[in-house]
Image: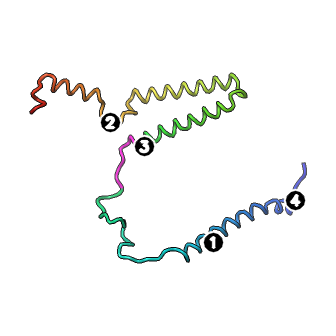
Amino acid sequence: MKQMNESESLVSLWPILVYAGGVVLLVAIMLVASYFLGERHKETATDTVYEGGITETGDARFKFPIHFYILAMFFVIFDLEAIFILAWAINVKALGWGGYIAISTFIGLLVAVFIYEWRIGALEFGPSGSKILKKYHKDFKSDPNKIIN
C-alpha cells in the first residue's frame, strides 16, 4: 500500500474545496441578488403580525391533545417497519432462511405491539360508539318520552 505524502493529500482535496467555494459563492450571489431585486414596501400593515385582513384572536400557542403526538409516533414506527420489510424483500434470496426467520420475528413483534396498543386504548381518539349506545339504551329505551322532552 502506497503512503501519501502531504502534497498528494492536498491535491486530492481540491475538488472538495472547489465545491465548497462554489456553494459559498452561489449563496452569496443569491443573497446579494435578493437584496437588490427584492420588493420594498412600507405600508402601515407591514409590521403587524398578520396582513390578511383578519384581526388576530387569542394566542397561537395552544396545547394539542396527546393523541396527535401518539398518532405521529405510530406513523413513524410503522413507516420504518415498511422500510425494513422492503429492504428484506429486495435481498430475500441473499438472506435465505435466516433472513426469513428474522423478518418473521420482526413482524410478529410489531403485530404483538399493535395488539397491545389496541387493547390499552391507545388507538381510540374519540368517544366509544358502544359506550354511547349503552347510554342511549339505558336512558331512552326504558322511557321513550325522554327523547321528546
56 relative to 36, above or below: above
Q: Which residue is mark 2?
A: 126
- Disc 1 is placed on an element classified as helix
The residue where tag 4 is placed is 5
Q: Is residue 60 above or below residue 91?
A: below
| Image coordinates for residue 21, horizontal then vertical, percent | 71, 67
Q: Earlier in the sequence, mark 2 or mark 4?
A: 4
Mark 4: which secondary structure?
Answer: loop
Point out the frontmost of discs 3 and 2.
2
94 or 41: nearer the eye?
A: 41
What's drawn in magenta, residue-wise? Answer: 61-69
Say which quarter of the image contains residue 103. Answer: top right
Callout 3–callout 2 Cβ contact below 8 Å: no
Q: Residue at x 24, y 26 (%)?
A: 133
Q: Is residue 14 above or below residue 92?
A: below
- Residue 51 is situated, as x and y percent measured from the top left of the image, at 37, 67
Residue under the point 67% across and 65% down: 23
Q: Quadrant of the C terminus?
A: top left
Q: CA distance from mark 2 to mark 4?
A: 68 Å
Magenta span contains residue 63: yes
Q: Mark 1 or 2, which is nearer the eye? A: 1
Q: Looking at the image, do the residues carrying marks 2 and 4 touch, with CB atoms under 8 Å apart?
A: no
Q: Earlier in the sequence, mark 1 or mark 2?
A: 1
| Residue type (three-letter) at the residue carrying disc 4 | Asn
CA gap, disc 4 to disc 3? Answer: 54 Å
Residue underneath mark 3: 69
Of labels 4 and 1, earlier in sequence is 4
